Image (cartoon, rainbow, N blue to C red):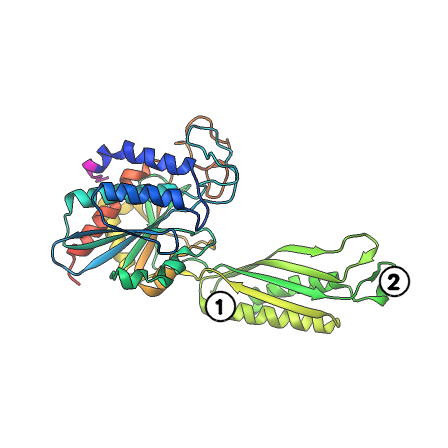
Amino acid sequence: MQLIESILADAASVTAIRRDIHAHPELCFQEERTADLIAKALTDWGIPIHRGLGKTGVVGIVKNGSSDRAVGLRADIDALPMTERNQFAHASKHPGKMHACGHDGHTAMLLAAAKHLAKHRNFDGTVYLVFQPAEEGGGGAREMIKDGLFEKFPMEAIFGAHNWPGMAVGQFALKTGPVFASSNEFRITIKGKGAHAALPHNGIDPVPIACQMVQAFQTIVTRNKRPIETAVISVTMIHAGEATNVIPDSCVLEGTVRTFTTEVLDLVERRMKGIAEATCAAFEAGCDFQFVRNYPPTVNHPAETEFARELLGEVVGPDNVQEFEPTMGAEDFSYFLQHKPGCYFLIGNGDGEHREGGHGMGPCMLHNPSYDFNDELIPLGATAWVRLAEKWLGTPR
């Protein structure tokens, strides 16, 4: 493993920053303290900054030489609306808010890289350090783009990384093509007619309609899309009725849809709407169908992925760069990849043995109240960012 000595020397101070961020988590578009901390650190290291993209986003600009070439490196900075079970010293001080996805660590890795890049500047061009808010449901990447990220900071490509529990420290994983799914929500209201449960013929019962609809949705996955394509339709909430002897007026179904391509998503939405409306019509019930598209699929670009694969292999050895098995989770880095070529890769977070005494005893998994980022990743991730930027700007295009 080829770690940069100056980054290793600064690991303790950057770890302190990471733990400070962990202790003071902030939710999407509320990352004021976090953004202030990032901005101060960058400014102290002589890095010009721009604030306000996506409301609380921060962009650092590290220039050197005369080249007009540029590359972007991204870290997300927001926390999750959940209560932490850990009791160690840097546990969240704010009930109902927790860095359970490691964005504090992503921020620390990019800060460590920023400090080294600003001090040594072993490149010709510009490195844009994109500290993005509101990944957890707020679409912060989309909002930064709307606010002119790529117009103000024209970069050739953008790269991002996410820690991955269960994968060993010292390993990376990546893949060309779809790696995270699209994230979408639906809400279907079946409008029946209430009646006494002992006299069902006087009403239109929405509950058996809902049951038929839920089962029919699965035929979209098994019979409408091609078998080699991927889709998940999960009805996760069904709400109806208030009393055991009353047929309810309505029944509400809610859930999520995940796909790796927009084409499959178009098919799923169209068929779900058709099935919902036709099933209700068959039982003389009304139907209100709502489908909301959140994050698009995260699709890595081939050339940038192969570039990252080679670079990461130089840092940790080719045998420690694995093929990423795509996940049906979602990630708003997808918006960046719709506008710029790039790659989103994983960095192993270990199995949880790194956690200090006082952790919550639960598994060290993403979005778990016992999770904590592995600080061993800070010098490794920072080294990878530095070497990636240097190699990108040093490779003729």
Q: Residue 136, which numbered label?
A: none
Which numbered mark, 1 or 2, is in the foreground of this view?
2
The residue that label 1 is drawn on is 264
- Which residue is painted at 32% across and 46% down in the image? 172
Task: Say which of 291 and 270 sits in front.
Answer: 291
Label 1, secondary structure: give it: helix
Is 151 magenta? The answer is: no
The disc labelled 1 sits on which kind of residue? Answer: Val
The magenta-colored residue range is 1-6
Could you tell whether 153 is left or right of 135 in the image? left
Residue 388 point in image, percent of width and height: 23, 50
Could you tell whether 384 is left or right of 180 in the image? left
Dot 1 or dot 2: first in sequence order is 2
Is 2 magenta? The answer is: yes
The residue that label 2 is drawn on is 199
Residue 381 point in image, percent of width and height: 29, 43
- Which residue is painted at 71% across and 70% down in the image? 286
Residue 166 point in image, percent of width and height: 42, 41
- The chief SS type of the magenta part is loop
Q: Quadrant of residue 257?
A: bottom right
